[in-house]
Structure formats: structure tokens, C-alpha cells
Amino acid sequence: MSYVDEVLELAIAKNPAQPEFHQAVKEVLESLRVVIEANEEKYRKEALLERMVTPERQILFRVPWVDDKGQVQVNNGFRVQFNSAIGPYKGGLRLHPSVNLGIIKFLGFEQVFKNSLTGLPIGGGKGGSDFDPKGKSDREVMAFCQSFMTELYRHIGADTDVPAGDIGTGAREIGYLFGQYKKIRNQYEGVLTGKGLTYGGSLARTEATGYGLLYLTEEMLKSNGQDIKDKVCAVSGAGNVAIYAIQKAQQLGAKPVTCSDSTGWIYDPEGIDVDLLKEIKEVKRARLTEYAAQRPSAQYHEGKGVWSVKCDVALPCATQNELTLDDAKMLVENGCIAVCEGANMPTTLEATEYLQQHKVFFVPGKASNAGGVATSALEMSQNSERLSWTFEEVDAKLKGIMVNIYHNIDDAAKKYGLDGNYVAGANIAGFLKVAEAMEAQGIV
Ligand code: GLU
């Protein structure tokens, strides 16, 4: 059996009932075949792939907190410190009822390659909890965050592990987490990113994932003889990534016409009104029905459906496995030319293969959504030098990083005879840097 197949089998057997983790490992290892097979004996002897798919450390903990009725609630807390070969562990905290160890491991594994692609010195990690911030009062969210940090603080630090936001963890949660860390440690350090601007946050961090997605999409289209201008975009999600993807798409002259949340989706043929969307999601924390109520051109539909809309470019910015094979078929039938992922692993393996077979440009999230974590690394730099850069400075650096990522994954794909296969390009380019650093550091 080939080394890749052996490790794939092993990863599945050793991590039962973690389908998302299996999926992420499968996608990466399959596309590394060309690289591994060229050096199979060496990599097997070093057990490099076994080490790559096994987190350095996994922390599971209890998070008790008291709700507004005086009732004690208990959630599960996770931090998976996956790989620190190229820098301190770095990655977000997801707060969502679906969170379990398998989900955090898939996200941590993806993060290792994503962070490597940014070209910045950050290792990979991820964490979170099955706590649902939706519908909770600010006091309840604070109580949860303080309890979560009361355990997490002993495992993290500016040079050890630097968590950030993800689904369910925004500016409010990062603020409470930072406050509790500072209180327990009596230390003012850049231990989290995505902080508020008054206490060490970076300008443009909020916008970075969505903006970065569009910078990379623009560059990829340009390199393939296409212009982002006037492209109709279908966007899913209505969170931080989707909002700023929509905003940047509009600034670049494209026309985003959809967005979605957990209960329904909007089709707005005149283009999404991003100010209204921001007001509803960032300020009121309300549902998209509210958007339709205030915008005559918008149609609200229950359930899923953004991929049924005719579009040139699809930008999945909601969550994992939201774009299925049936969705991919609809996109192809409607003449979609590109799918660039804003979320982490939003496209199923079958859908990805179908899109690639039908010559749709497909960029995986570990490349196209890396702008968020890249800007987090810029926030770490600013914290270290105790300075704040201007919005324009950070934004220009972000754009440079995204353009670079595109060319790196494109070049890596070409080098291995996989021209246009950006999944392979991203996995290979991300892997090679981490592998080299691991080999240099010995068996640790
Ligand atoms: N959660 C984001 C991601 O998936 C950002 C992580 C960070 O800024 O550390 O990359």
C-alpha cells in the first residue's frame, strides 16, 4: 500500500466518528500524492505524515457558567494545538452548538496549511465550544467567556498560542476573553487577535477575511483573462466574512446578489445593500427577514438556496459542507466560472471534484480565506512593536499577501503538472514549508 493510503487509513481508524476531520485529511493527503511519492521512503521513515495528521496537543475542558435565571450551565471547551513548526499556534475559537472535537481538529488541520500559505510565522491551532452565543444576554456571554478563559489561560500566550475569532466569536467575545486573561495573568500582551481598536486591535482586521477573499479572486480571474468587474456573485452567509466580501466585491465593481443565515436566504437582484445588512447583523443581531422587510427589491426564502441563483462567481462564506454536489451541478448549469471559498471547507469533496471536472476555477478556503489570519499575524507584529499601523498600510499588506498566495499556489500546481488545480497547489505549497521546518527541528 502506498504511504499516503496507509496514513489515510490510520488517520480514519485512530480518530473514529470524526467525519469532518477525515474529509480534511483526505483532501490534503490525496493532493500531496505527487510530492510524497517522489520521496516516499524518506517521509515514511520520518513518519512525517503521521506527525502531520496528529495534533501536538489537544486540550478538552469543562466550562461551567451561570445563566440569567441563576441556573448553572455546562459546556465543553476545546483547544487543539496542531502544529507549531513555523510559529506559535494560531487560529480562531468557534462558538456554535455543532462544535465537537472532530470539527475543531478539521479546522486546526486546515489552519496549519493556511497559516503556512500566508508566508508569516504562525503555526496552526483551533478551539471553541458548543456554547451558542445566539439569544444569550451580554452578561451570559461574559460569564461563559470568563469561565472559558479561566481554563484556557494556562495553555496560551503571545509566544505560545494566540487564539482569535471564528463563527460565534466576534469583537464582544474577544473583549471578554482578553479582559479575563489580563486579570488572571496580570500581563498586557497580544494573546488574542481581533481585539478592539482601543486595546491593541489592528485596523482592517474586521474586514480582512472578506476583503482578502476578493483580492485573491480578482487576481485569480485576472491571471485567467477575466475581470471581476460586472461579475454577478452569489454569496452565502451573513457573518463577518460574507459582509466584507460583499462590500469589497461592490468596491471592485462586481454585483453580489445573495446572502444567507441559518434560517433562510436573500436574493436581491439590485445588489445587496451592505449598510442595511451590517445594521441588521452587526448591530441588531437580527434575522434576514428583517432585511427583506426593509428592502423592497429583496426576496426572502426559507431554508437553503443561494446556489440556485444564476451567477458568474460563487463565494461560500457560511460554514463547512454547505455547497454539495447538487449545488455544484446547479452552478455549472447556470454558467458559474469560479468558486472561491470564504468559509473553511464549505464545499464537499464530491462537489469540489465536479466543479474541477467542469473547468470551474476553484480556490480552497485555506488559500482564499487566509486574509483573516494573515491580518491577525499583522496584529501580532503591531502588538510586539507596540505600534498601530494605518488602515491603508494594513490593507496594502493584506492585498500583497493575497496576491502572493494566489501566485504561490498557481506555481506549485504548475510545478507538479497540475496546472489550474488550486486545491493541489495550496496543499503542496502549504505542506512543503511546514515539512521542511519539521524536518529541521528533529523528532519533537
Ligand atoms: N478563524 C479564522 C480562520 O479560520 C481566523 C483565525 C485567526 O485570525 O487566528 O482563519
Image (cartoon, rainbow, N blue to C red):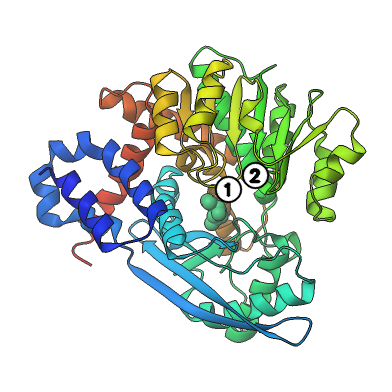
Count of marks, rendered view: 2
User: Residue shown at 72%/63% (left/top)?
Assistant: 134
Circle 1 is placed at which residue position? 372
Disc 1 marks which amino acid? Gly
Disc 2 marks which amino acid? Val
Q: Secondary structure at mark 1?
A: helix
- Number of residues whose C-alpha sits closer than 10 Å to that of mark 1, classed few (under 14), some (14–19) or many (20 or more): many
Q: Depth check: 95 or 208 in front?
A: 95
Q: Is residue 137 visible?
A: yes
Measured from the top left, where is residue 158 in percent x and y? Answer: 51, 69
- Number of residues whose C-alpha sits closer than 10 Å to that of mark 2, classed few (under 14), some (14–19) or many (20 or more): many
User: Residue shown at 26%/56% (left/top)?
Assistant: 11
- In the figure, is residue 63 to the left or right of 348? right
Task: Decide: is 86 above or below 397.
Answer: below
Q: Does ligand 1 reach within 8 Å of label 2's beta carbon?
A: no
Query: Residue 241 has which mark?
Result: 2
- Check the picture and name the quadrant holding the C terminus: bottom left
- In the figure, is residue 320 to the left or right of 124? right
Measured from the top left, where is residue 312 in percent x and y? Answer: 61, 19
